[in-house]
Amino acid sequence: MKALVYEHDGQHTWKDVPDARIQEPTDIVVQVTATTICGSDLHILKGDVPEVTDGTILGHEAIGIVTEGGSSVRRVKPGDRVLVSCITSCGSCEQCRRQKYGLCTGGGGWILGHTIDGVQAEYARVPFADTSVYPVPEHLSDEQVLFLTDVLPTAFEVGVLAGRLAPGETMAVIGAGPIGIGVMMTAKLLSPSRIIALDMSDARLERSLTFGATDTVNNAGLTAVEILERIGLPDGVDLAVEAVGTPATFELAADLVAAGGRIANIGVHGKPATLHMERLWTRDITITMGLVDTHTIPQLLRLVQSGQLHPELLASHEFALADTTEAYEAFGNVAASNAMKVFMQAVPAAVPPAMAGAN
Amino acid sequence: MKALVYEHDGQHTWKDVPDARIQEPTDIVVQVTATTICGSDLHILKGDVPEVTDGTILGHEAIGIVTEGGSSVRRVKPGDRVLVSCITSCGSCEQCRRQKYGLCTGGGGWILGHTIDGVQAEYARVPFADTSVYPVPEHLSDEQVLFLTDVLPTAFEVGVLAGRLAPGETMAVIGAGPIGIGVMMTAKLLSPSRIIALDMSDARLERSLTFGATDTVNNAGLTAVEILERIGLPDGVDLAVEAVGTPATFELAADLVAAGGRIANIGVHGKPATLHMERLWTRDITITMGLVDTHTIPQLLRLVQSGQLHPELLASHEFALADTTEAYEAFGNVAASNAMKVFMQAVPAAVPPAMAGAN
Amino acid sequence: MKALVYEHDGQHTWKDVPDARIQEPTDIVVQVTATTICGSDLHILKGDVPEVTDGTILGHEAIGIVTEGGSSVRRVKPGDRVLVSCITSCGSCEQCRRQKYGLCTGGGGWILGHTIDGVQAEYARVPFADTSVYPVPEHLSDEQVLFLTDVLPTAFEVGVLAGRLAPGETMAVIGAGPIGIGVMMTAKLLSPSRIIALDMSDARLERSLTFGATDTVNNAGLTAVEILERIGLPDGVDLAVEAVGTPATFELAADLVAAGGRIANIGVHGKPATLHMERLWTRDITITMGLVDTHTIPQLLRLVQSGQLHPELLASHEFALADTTEAYEAFGNVAASNAMKVFMQAVPAAVPPAMAGAN
Amino acid sequence: MKALVYEHDGQHTWKDVPDARIQEPTDIVVQVTATTICGSDLHILKGDVPEVTDGTILGHEAIGIVTEGGSSVRRVKPGDRVLVSCITSCGSCEQCRRQKYGLCTGGGGWILGHTIDGVQAEYARVPFADTSVYPVPEHLSDEQVLFLTDVLPTAFEVGVLAGRLAPGETMAVIGAGPIGIGVMMTAKLLSPSRIIALDMSDARLERSLTFGATDTVNNAGLTAVEILERIGLPDGVDLAVEAVGTPATFELAADLVAAGGRIANIGVHGKPATLHMERLWTRDITITMGLVDTHTIPQLLRLVQSGQLHPELLASHEFALADTTEAYEAFGNVAASNAMKVFMQAVPAAVPPAMAGAN
């Protein structure tokens, strides 16, 4: 089979590799029909994720058809179309039993394309299938569900739910990339009165308006006080979601939040941030952070089925699965491509998906 | 009347001042029968709290007898013995209606001994009496309820409840001063399996054992990893309560907490802390902070009545109200006095209160 | 002044009465600019509410202009336009402090048009004004906010919030009268995947579709099993809201709910219901019931301001305040009028409000 | 092997049966070292549980040693001592993933001694072992953990946690049998100020006092009003736990609860109850009911380890595993034996367990 292999020093190649096969009775093998690229894949290529060793197949988001199932797999069978969660759940450790799959201590967590081979491939082995994949309702297309594997559960769980958003509240979303856009899409399920998108790219901000932002602010060169004044909320917002991952944006979140408010961090951080406890200690603030668990996948699937969520709108570009070089180039060079998420499919579609905001 | 007046440059004097009197229809005047000193009073004397102007009467914790009530006061009347909350609540702003009295925007919050005259005095004016004082059940002594004015609600609300402690969990309390001891006392109401007291004073740690600590660690010179190893919890504790207020102790809290755990900050901070987001972002941590609201005073009163809480044990020293110089000296010089909380009463008691841990 | 007075034996008259005036320092008097009729007013006229004595002015929902304020009123002043909650909150009893205003033990609760004179009058006295009325933002019309006095908070608090509705869930609303319609309107704020309206009137069901119902079932003669089969949810719904108030509809709610689901009762009951504990005890069901507290009025006001809630659509008929006879006739005879809510205003509007569903 | 087999018409025999053996890769076989009898076993013998067919081995509570494990069992291995939950969890259905194991749709739920052979036997097959059994810490005896298989999780989850008990609240426990006693034991973990035990047996009530009851009332012939007057709580209790299972006791619970309170039903009901909605609809009451999930077993194990919970005190009588006739006789005839729970062990202990309250 062919797969996208991480070589070393940022190199990756679409090449022949040994076929994926069952190793444990709880495994399945899926034929990948759709996959995508995540910001963390770019981090891996930069060498920021040392756990990834040379020769590892990349990718942790996929839709596929089950081709083979281990002897104890009960919930899916060959021929089933399944959504493969980016987080593998052993299903039986104490963390998994509390739906903290991202903290799985039984061999799961983020392992696909990280500590084991991933899904940017023609076929992939998925461990703990009964608790890590979800059957896709027949009438939903791959496009409609692919982004439920990672970006939308992340946005919803780590941003919206951890941030305890309630109807009528105000929120700021710092960073209007795919995750920030996902936060806006899923925040709308809970009817905030204001969703303020902050970014330094006007193109991203303009796109935010089609995904639920009620206000946009290009925050380049602006202080938190200036931002709050501009949006007419001098006391701050009820919820600030950090979706960038830098000390500056984290500290901006802390400066934007009202007394009694919440800061939900989603950003992947490489450096420490400064927490101004000398100002914050009296302000009744809650700060949350964490990996996605993907426990909301069934809930989000229902919302796609009922027409209340349109994940396919996140796809700005489409590629054949084999055209990985082009796909990584588009996703990795947003300034040029204005890419949000790429949709990669096994057999190129005759008709392209919805191209929201694509140029 | 006599009162303890903040002069300037750390000076304070017990001296004659004009009598406290009703200014608003929602005010009461109380004759103070018992009061105490808080760590924040020491901060004021050091000049750290610039809102306190020369001539202000200090103190925000008192038990007293109502001597006069404004025309619209309905819930207490002259002669009633009342507990005066350290937090004044207007009762009608949106924050107060959500029990966030510490964030009151209607003229309350921490005002006594801060922005208006306080209660280390023979008499004191208390604004918004209907929502800021609580009748004391007749059979409870001043000693039994004085520490429900501030230290125990702070420990319970900002430490234990904000930290969402559940039965069987493990917790660390960083700082075994009065607040830390209050955390241990009120944490026991929710039956954690382990309460680990951390401090650099062996005397304080030894005293912790009589207030609910199951383990003590003198953390001088120890890393978080060494501490966790010593207590046999290498993965960390479910809840870390910061009750000191320095960057080092805050960062220690972050290093002690297990994946999926909570950090509850109570400490009063004067400097920023470093938050190691590069390590924490995946760990599903929640950090809380905030002023006390004292909304649990009725609940804590019931627990004192039922014999499940013994606040009087916090009193290590007793003074007459007029002996403020001696009281501040004892409370301010813990190394010499080993003081926890001082109990100051209008008429010296013939029999001293329980002197837990006093030397 | 003129007011609608309950005489006896179902009689009511619009007639001259003594002017409303301040009695307590916490009172205000408002000039009523808009009011409406509630199902409970009809109950009073039938003699079902014995606490209402002859000569009482009816009505507990109003918008008005403050004409006079008691000496301790701080948050509103003469000239302010205010929303008068159907529930009066003393603001200082233990129930009010926990936002359980409907259970107020300090002299509030449902008193307007019940145990004291109400608001279907040219002027009305409103006790505990600081915690019982809310300033109306200038750019919102009376029509836009009148139904936040009772019907929408009731629907939202007692139906949607008590029922812990979450995005993607399924719900049944039994009874498509004004309250049931209010449940559908406010449920949409939380994005359920299905809202099934049940009623025996096809006209009401048809109207439900414009207020958020995704499905309608005329349940006359149908069993719960047949209903669930018809809507394709054989296992039941996640939430069943009872908005009628009969034993049969309550028992239907219990039969419609899925294992693990919730039943939220809003209906006003006059008779006991049978609870089939022999079937329910294993099914992990939660049943809630209670008077509205109206603690969500500020939240709902924000949602009207942001354009996410359109309470004015509940008004099916409009009358001048003085035309109470006609208004009661229309509201009391729904079969003939197809009325939902009536909008009564002090000075007849030149242009009628949105007449959703009126014929 | 020998086992207790349900014959028909209330007959049961300890006799030879085919050996328990692995049927699915997720099964284990355990050698039972300790087991007990549940009230539902008595219901089965009375013929009230028609799903139980002739020839079924009874019993759903056991401690045992793993003798064999299916090919996909990962978390336990032969030789491990395990606690067998009364509820089997498939671990992968949507209910199990939300910790609603009692509602398992994947083949689990209450199946042991019900729809498949149970554990009152020398050996037993346990399906879905990885998510249905728990390793027992070495230093804990069988006596200390046996009652964590059913009675204590039931009391804690369905009574205390569903009832949302908070420190300082008041509660009534209707029925002082094993479940009611378990409610008292686990309620103490959350420090209610009053635990009022109600029963018609003075012996049971007296025993309640040693398990945490602060008050006891023999409610034979008393109305709810009289009971509340006697205990000095005329407004009712915050939480009423029903632990009997009759219409009369359920209705008593509804009459004892204060406005704003909760009713938690644990009792197994065979008949409908009357719910006085005409009185309750305004009172802001929450009623919960449901099978145990046993998701708190790990939490309760930690509390046993830390010495905060002493389940062994529930054992009033001890028998050898083979002496099932005597054990059922003692447990089934409480009036004569005053039995609470029986402790049956494979090899009779030389020293009897703690005989709390046994006469």
Image (tube, coloured by chain):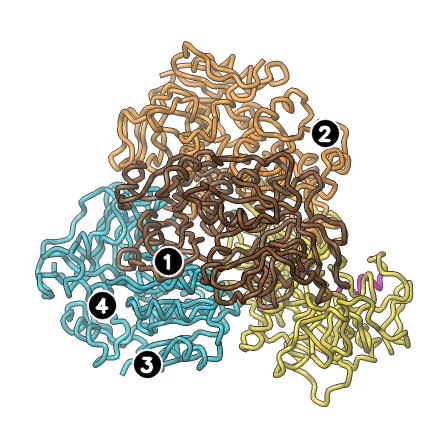
Chain colours: A cyan, B brown, C yellow, D orange
Q: Nearer the viewer, mark 2 or mark 3?
A: 3
Badge 3 density bin: few <14, some 14–19, many ≥20, Cα 10 Å: few
Q: Chain letter for mark 3, please.
A: A
Quickly name the residue at label 1.
A297
Q: Chain letter for mark 1, please.
A: A
Q: Nearer the viewer, mark 1 or mark 4?
A: 1
Tell me, yes or no, whether the two marked residues, 3 and 1, touch with CB atoms within 8 Å.
Answer: no
Q: Chain letter for mark 4, please.
A: A
Residue furthest to the top in view is: D350
Quickly name the residue at label 2.
D219
Q: Nearer the viewer, mark 4 or mark 3?
A: 3
Q: Earlier in the sequence, mark 4 or mark 3?
A: 3
Tell me the quadrant of the picture where the C terminus of chain D can be found. top right
Tell me the quadrant of the picture where the N terminus of chain D can be found. top left
Q: Quadrant of residue C157?
A: bottom right
Going by the numbered disc 1, the residue's amino acid type is: Ile
Q: Is residue C258 among what the camera can see?
A: no
Going by the numbered disc 4, the residue's amino acid type is: Gln
Quickly name the residue at label 4.
A345
Left or right: C94 with respect to B334? right
Front residue (pair C143, B332)? B332
| Residue at 29%, 54% in the rendered image | A87
Front residue (pair C303, A129)? C303
| Residue at 34%, 46% in the rendered image | A96
| Residue at 23%, 77% in the rendered image | A334
Q: Nearer the viewer, mark 3 or mark 1?
A: 3
SS class of the residue under badge 3?
A: loop
Q: Is residue A332 among what the camera can see?
A: yes
SS class of the residue under badge 1?
A: helix
**Distance CA(mark 2)–CA(mark 1):** 50 Å
